[in-house]
């Protein structure tokens, strides 16, 4: 099957936006850490979702027909667009609440109405491809890979934003002659939390990739175009091993493991987490390319 680039960008950007917002809300509103990044993380999530929505419209060929597609409530486009709109609207309300200095309780209530559809949306953009007519896609492992990928991208994005704001805070306090111990302790605590979250998500992603390979090996209507041999040792092997495994698991895992979470002055490395973010975003796109390449139909078996 040919690669649908508009859908690749749509699912990557939507996963990125949902991941950023969910990880930010959990860390800032429910864990109570790194509250200084609430505004910038929400704006970044909103921009990513907008980019994903734009890519989705371009996929139609005739963008003006989006209104016709939205007229069918049972269609996948309608469901995804509805959830995308709900998440975007909630982020805007959340930003307004922050600007007006709303209480912690209010911010939690507002954020939860966006957190739930954001998780559902990250799962749904992968569930759309679960089709019996395409054996390589006919598994719930796919949407869970999309969901886990969104979480990894979100955690790395949040790490980049925290590293940026923390370095600015340290410089500002040093210029005022204030001790940096409080900033270091805060950064250490946040770093430990995000490090555990990322390593756990990477472990889950590794298990899901293995599960997907097992599905390819056991799926009905076997064909070389969607075989596990093609992924592990065929023309898709460089993409799988280089993109999904190296860039998606090993490099991010090594970079996040280098973050020290104990001792004075230990904090995020802006370069390391930025490189990790680039790797997981590229890996997310590469996996979708592999998925589309495996999406041959069972139709030839009936002719």
Image: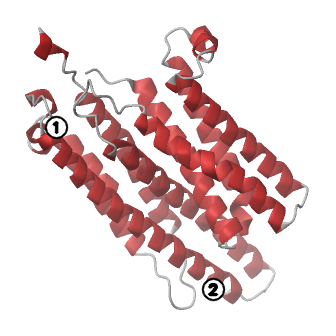
Q: Specify the label residue 185 is tagged with.
A: 2
Q: Position of residue 58 (x, y in %)?
A: 52, 18
Question: Which disc number belongs to residue 219?
Answer: 1
Q: Earlier in the sequence, mark 2 or mark 1?
A: 2
Q: Nearer the viewer, residue 88 or 143?
A: 143
Residue at x 31% of width, y 53% of height: 247
Image coordinates of residue 261 in percent, x first then y, are 50, 83
Element type at marker 2?
helix
Q: Is residue 133 above or below residue 287?
A: above
Q: Label 2 neighbourhood size at 10 Å, few (<14), some (14-19), many (20+)? A: some
Q: Using the numbered discs, state the Cα–Cα distance from disc 2 to disc 1 in whole angstroms.
A: 51 Å
Taking the image as shown, residue 39 lies to the left or right of residue 258, namely right
Residue 223 occupies which quadrant of the picture? top left
Q: Position of residue 274 (x, y in %)?
A: 49, 58
Work out whether residue 245 can be spotted.
yes
Mark nearest the camera among 2 and 1 is 1
């Amino acid at each position: 099957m040919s690669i649908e680039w508009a859908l690749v960008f749509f699912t990557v950007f939507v996963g990125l936006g949902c991941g950023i917002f969910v990880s930010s809300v959990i860390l800032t509103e429910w864990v109570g850490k790194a509250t200084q990044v609430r505004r910038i993380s929400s704006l970044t999530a909103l921009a990513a979702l907008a980019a994903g929505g734009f890519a989705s419209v371009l996929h139609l060929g005739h963008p003006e027909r989006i209104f016709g597609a939205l007229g069918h409530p049972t269609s996948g486009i309608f469901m995804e667009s509805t959830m995308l709109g709900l998440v975007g609207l909630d982020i805007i309300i959340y930003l307004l609440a922050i600007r007006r200095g709303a209480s912690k309780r209010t911010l939690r209530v507002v954020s939860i109405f966006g957190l739930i559809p954001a998780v559902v949306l990250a799962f749904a953009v992968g569930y759309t491809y679960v089709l019996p007519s395409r054996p390589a896609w006919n598994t719930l492992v796919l949407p869970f890979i999309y969901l886990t990928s969104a979480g990894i991208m979100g955690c790395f994005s949040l790490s980049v934003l925290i590293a940026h704001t923390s370095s600015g805070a340290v410089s500002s306090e040093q210029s005022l002659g204030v001790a940096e111990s409080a900033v270091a302790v805060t950064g250490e605590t946040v770093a430990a939390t995000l490090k555990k979250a990322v390593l756990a998500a990477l472990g889950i992603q590794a298990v899901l990739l293995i599960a997907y390979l097992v599905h390819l090996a056991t799926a009905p209507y076997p064909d070389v175009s969607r075989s596990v041999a093609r992924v592990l040792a065929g023309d898709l092997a460089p993409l799988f091993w280089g993109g999904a495994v190296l860039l998606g698991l090993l490099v991010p895992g090594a970079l996040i493991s280098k973050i020290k979470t104990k001792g004075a002055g230990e904090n995020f490395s802006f370069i390391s987490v930025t490189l990790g973010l680039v790797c997981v975003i590229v890996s997310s796109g590469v996996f979708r390319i592999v998925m589309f390449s495996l999406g041959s139909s069972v139709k030839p078996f009936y002719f």
